[in-house]
Amino acid sequence: MAIGMSRSRLIAMVVLIGLILAGVWLAGSGIPGLQRTRSVSSVVDDVATQAQVREFCGACHAIPHPRLLPRESWAEEIPKAFRRYEASGRHDLTVPDESTILEYFSRLAPAAMVVRNAPEGTESPVKFRTEVVRLPGKNKSAAVSFLATDSSSTEDETSADRLVLCDMQSGWLHRLSWNSGTLTNEPLFKMKSPDHVAFCDFEGDGRQEYLLADLGTMQPSDDLKGAVFLVPAESDRSPREAITVKGNLGRIADAQMADLDGDGDKDFVVAEFGFEKVGRLLWLETVSVKDGRPQTELHVIDPRHGSIHAPMTDLDGDGDMDIIALISQEFEMIVAYMNDGHGSFSEQTLFEADSPSFGSSGLELVDLDADGDIDVLFTNGDTLDTFQLRPFHAVNWLENQGVGAFKYHQLALLPGAVKAVAGDLDNDGDLDIAAVAFCPPFLRHMIRPQILDTLLWLEQTSPGQYTRHPLARAPVGHMAITLGDFDGDRDLDIAVGEFSPFSPQTRDWATIYWSELSDNAVASVP
């Protein structure tokens, strides 16, 4: 035995040498099927390259596996990753040879990726009839990015909800209502590229307002065109007169309102998605109010770009509002920002994907298992990041197990999953889930067959167990979904938005799936 070497290390070395020699022999042999065995130098090169990938790529995000993308995609993604590092201003990493990294990923990547549609599922026990809402005026296509259910008009149990719609193509915020089956469309406010609406009461006078997030531009950009607006829900003016809460920001994906510092007024949380150089999670402290307009001071909670959603809840039960943010781009994580009650936040990671191309796309806070605490319902299925469908796109659940612990569950595979929402669709007293998926036409070749589930609902048949019911299959799909009782018949209907800037020949704006439940149980949306 060599001096200073343990018996176990010696055995391991002998085995390794034996495997390498066997590999060399097999590579040079004429045995069928073994001619592709790697050479010793190739194995050693891969080990060295893997170490470089771990140190360089892993310093910023989860380490990607070469099989996550087809070969031709790495030829685009690797150079972009190196350019991002150059633009980041960092100089603390040893930069490997770009061609070596590209060769490594390309050699191990599949030539192409084919995504199979998810399992068939079963026929829905709830019957729905569909109504297509056509674009108003001369508009030729829609890009509905967000839908919300406005229940503020509900005066009794039989009153109908209203549907609030963000159309990025036209820039308009609309509100739709149905009175005895007749559709009324109210154009409320025009922005550049509306992406989210939340309901609030800024002045505490009982009058509802819409808090609007404006991307500023639909196309990826670091331009400072994003903004946050307050628009009165009810007004004699059409369009509404809006209050600009904050402008000259990066692309804004979400805005929420709460008293974050315990001083009695309302502050704002803003998910500035941005793009590459621009993007942060912010809170805007209201320092004064002048003529009904908030005067704010900007604070950075998290400097990372890519925040999609940032809803709030009192996660730790200490009486103040905490933030749970979905951060996409290369970070792909769900983070809780715990508030000390005075506007200072500590960070707690609830979930982190094992791939920078996980495709985070949507998040909703809901007590899914009805155990008295807040869970996280989220989707991953973004097809507009690396322009790829993934076999692991899905609807997911982070189960709150108390004391800051969350357990991950994948509930249903769904290629192109964009958003999931919870509600009691069958009126049996528990929460079900409805979800939509989106696949741009230029990715259709990746699907076999060339059609996918674009709308489904997951029936909760027992605690934490779900049965899949596809409601629509199409080659493109939807970006937005909400649940509401839009006809006042005490069951939940489903509204999905059409996103068709790629198909200007269609005039579809939204589709309503009217529930035909015959019982009289009261529908519930959390």
Image (tube, helix red, strand yellow):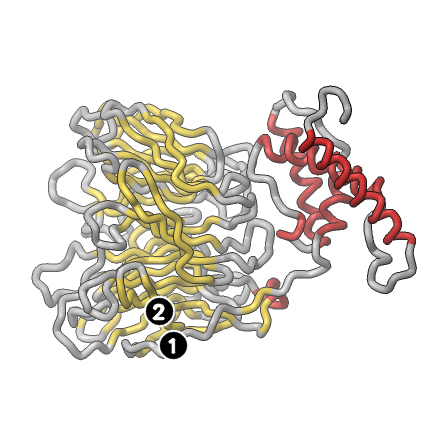
Q: Where residue 473 sits in the image (x, y, percent)?
A: 46, 73
**Image: 426 above or below 108:** below
Report how far apart the C-alphas of labels 2 and 1 lie in the structure. 8 Å
Q: Quadrant of the C terminus?
A: bottom left
- Which residue is at the front of the view, 229 or 49? 49
Q: Quadrant of residue 143?
A: bottom left
Check residue 489 in the rendering and tell me which mark sits there, or answer none: none
At mark 1, the secondary structure is loop
Neighbours of disc 2 within 10 Å: few (<14), some (14-19), many (20+): some
Is residue 505 visible in the rendered structure shown here? no
Residue at point 41%, 42% (across, down): 326
Neighbours of disc 1 within 10 Å: few (<14), some (14-19), many (20+): few
- Which residue is at the front of the view, 46 or 112? 46
Amino acid type of the residue tagged 2 in the rendering: Thr
Q: Quadrant of residue 339?
A: top left
As drawn, which residue projects farthest toward the front? 1
| Residue under pointer 2 | 467
Residue at point 28%, 39% (across, down): 312
Q: Where residue 81 sits in the image (x, y, percent)?
A: 65, 38
Q: Quadrant of the N terminus?
A: top right
**Image: 475 above or below 221:** below
> In the visual, does 50 lie left or right of 523?
right
Q: Where residue 366 sits in the image (x, y, percent)?
A: 27, 50
> In the visual, does 300 lie left or right of 259?
right
Q: Which of the two discs, 2 and 1, labels the residue nearer the N terminus?
A: 1
Check residue 122 in the rendering and tell me which mark sits there, or answer none: 1
- Which residue is at the front of the view, 468 or 236? 468
Residue at point 35%, 40% (across, down): 310
> In the visual, does 415 lie left or right of 229?
right
